[in-house]
């Protein structure tokens, strides 16, 4: 049977019940949660879900389903249909080497841009990215990334790229290869 897929994005001031409220709407409508990620950004809870259902549902109908929970929890919900060709296995997941990279140093503008631009220029895909500023007398900016590196780029070359990029930005880094990649 054919499945229809949607991306659902939720954001709102953190409070208990957001995940339960969103999950109930999806359950009541007959959706399966295929993939999800959520995190707390300052005091804002954010969640992204990829959901599926065996019947075609309009975006408007799905948005209306969230009306009560949106109002009760004071959150925003965005929905986008995902076309079947968008769900095909991506090449970087098949052929890339996975690395965990941490970048850290004094907080200043341009760290995310500088590192992500260097990666993009070398066809390195950022799979997951998290940033935080530590709560300390001397705050430290920390960025942690999971990246997919093309097989033709050796670990030594990745470290040279990171060294040059981080040196320009005045930050430090560490990188380690992830031998297996499964959730």
Image: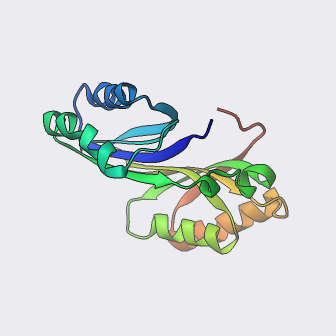
Give the side of residue 77 with respect to residue 49, left or right: left
Instruction: State the image quarter where residue 110 is shown.
Output: bottom left
The residue shown at (55%, 74%) is 168
Give the side of residue 24 with respect to residue 157, left or right: left
Q: Tell me if residue 126 can be seen.
A: yes
Q: Nearer the viewer, residue 156 or 106?
A: 156
Colour mode? rainbow
Quadrant for the N terminus in the image:
top right
Residue 85 in the image, given as x and y percentages of width and height: 64, 57
Q: Please determine whether, in this image, residue 181 is positioned above or below residue 98.
A: above
Q: Nearer the viewer, residue 49 or 147?
A: 49
Q: Nearer the viewer, residue 54 or 69?
A: 54
Instruction: State the image quarter where residue 126 is shown.
Output: bottom right
Residue 146 in the image, given as x and y percentages of width and height: 61, 48
Q: Please determine whether, in this image, residue 180 is positioned above or below residue 140.
A: above
Q: Tell me if residue 41 can be seen.
A: no
Q: Nearer the viewer, residue 73 or 110?
A: 73
């Amino acid at each position: 049977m054919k499945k229809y897929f949607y991306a659902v994005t939720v954001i709102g001031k953190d409070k208990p019940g957001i995940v339960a409220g969103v999950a109930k709407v999806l359950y009541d409508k007959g959706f399966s949660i295929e993939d999800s990620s959520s995190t707390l950004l300052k005091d804002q809870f954010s969640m992204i879900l990829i959901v599926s259902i065996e019947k075609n549902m309009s975006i408007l109908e799905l948005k209306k389903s969230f009306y009560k929970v949106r109002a009760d929890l004071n959150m925003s919900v965005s929905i986008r249909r995902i076309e079947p060709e968008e769900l095909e296995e991506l090449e970087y997941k098949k052929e890339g080497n996975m690395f965990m990279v941490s970048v850290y140093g004094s907080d200043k503008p341009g760290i995310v841009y500088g590192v992500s631009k260097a990666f993009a220029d070398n066809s390195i895909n950022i799979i997951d990215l998290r940033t935080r500023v530590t709560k300390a007398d001397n705050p430290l900016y920390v960025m942690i990334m999971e990246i997919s590196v093309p097989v033709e780029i050796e670990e030594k070359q990745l470290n040279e790229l990171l060294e040059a990029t981080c040196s320009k930005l005045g930050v430090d880094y560490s990188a380690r290869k992830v031998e297996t990649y499964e959730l």
